[in-house]
Image (spheres, rainbow, N blue to C red):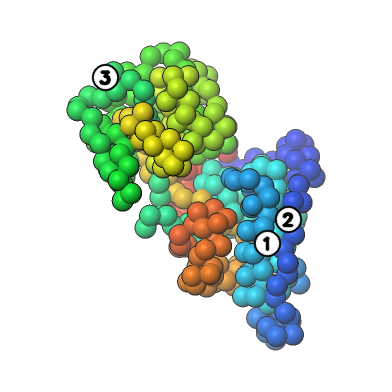
Amino acid sequence: MKRSLSAAALAAATALVLAACGSGGGDDDATGGDAEGGGGDLPDTLVLGLVPSVEVDALTEDASELAAMLSDELGVEVEAEVTTDFTALVVAMGTGQADIGMFGPIALVNAVDQSDAVAILQSVRFGSSTYHTQWFTNDPGTYCLDEAITVPDDEGSEYAFCNGAEASEGPTGEDALALVPEGAPISFVDAASASGYYYPATQLGEVQGIDPVNDINTVFAGGHPNSVQNVARGDAPVGVSFNDARTDLIEEDPEIGTAVTVFASSPEIPNDGVAVSGELSEEAQQQIADAFLAIAETDEGLAVLDAVYSIEGLVPADLEALDAARQVAANFGEE
């Protein structure tokens, strides 16, 4: 069911933080930005919206580089704008303030359902267009139903797992989730995070037969590495993050890989992706998709995509996987 945009959401759109403006690196004379050239029926200017996942100034600079590359590919000016959060960006897509958006999976389906956006691409990481939540604990004696193992990475760092949670795809270890005590604090990431809240809360609710919104003692850490640290220092007995957020901490804390043990994982989650305004023609939508794919085929383009959102490649959007994300979002009134 489509939900009308709330007044609060519209206010969020009005409060967009225009923290970055693309350099508009395309040269219309050189690339043919008019109807006879590369621009086709694209508008003279396109706005690319992003949401901070790293320090805002760093994203601003990297987003400007990506906008310049898109300008070169499309033959029209592309401006990058960093919004306050995904809610603002979803609304911006529906109010004409953004033409292209880069979204997490739940926000991506919200953009489609609430703002008539069109999902065109999904990110690839580690060779996959999906990922999963990992559940970890500082108490493996309680949550490991088999013997814990350590798995080294290419750098020789060790990471602890049990219950088959080292598998490349989820779900795993769901029997152990039944052991999480009622009312125990659980370190989640953020109320808008797919892998850091929506999926694991849904999974725990299904395993324990409880309401994932009202019957879980949620503690939001504010970031995936923060959630790992919460559990490592004993602020919560269990926590969640994307797989494997421990690698983000290993340089500063070489023991973090074994300080917490990953004991379960969620079903697979579609990676974040790119959506375009439904007001654009199908030809224009395809031109934008082709431009992103062309950028992803170059070393320079991949470096920028990696800097923006750790993207290692792009593939057409998996609408079936996104529909599964839509069902998860419905548990939290996102429909």
Q: Where does residue 138 sit, x and y in percent of width and height? A: 36, 23
- The structure residue drawn at horizontal position 60% and vertical position 68%, both measured from the top left corner, is 288
- The structure residue drawn at horizontal position 43% and vertical position 35%, both measured from the top left corner, is 253
- The structure residue drawn at horizontal position 53% and vertical position 22%, both measured from the top left corner, is 219
- In the drawing, what numbered circle is on residue 64? 1
Query: What quarter of the picture does the C terminus occupy?
Result: top right
Q: Residues within 10 Å of mark 1 (few under 14, many from 20)?
A: many
Q: CA distance from mark 3 to mark 1?
A: 49 Å
Q: Amino acid at mark 3?
A: Gly
Confirm whether residue 201 shows in the render: no
Furthest residue in direction left, as rendered: 147
Pick the residue in front: 28 or 321: 28
Q: Amino acid at mark 2?
A: Ala
SS label for mark 2: loop
> Quarter of the image holding residue 69?
bottom right
In the picture provided, is 32 more to the left or to the right than 262? right
Mark positioned earlier in the residue sequence (3 or 2) = 2
Q: CA distance from mark 2 to mark 1?
A: 7 Å
Mark positioned earlier in the residue sequence (2 or 1) = 2
Q: Where does residue 274 sit, x and y in percent of width and height? A: 56, 57
SS label for mark 1: helix
- The residue at which mark 2 appears reads as 20
Disc 3 vs disc 1: Cβ atoms closer than 8 Å? no
Q: Where does residue 246 sit, x and y in percent of width and height? A: 41, 38
Disc 2 vs disc 1: Cβ atoms closer than 8 Å? yes
SS label for mark 3: helix
- The residue at which mark 3 appears reads as 141
- In the drawing, what numbered circle is on residue 229? none
Q: Where does residue 205 sit, x and y in percent of width and height? A: 42, 24
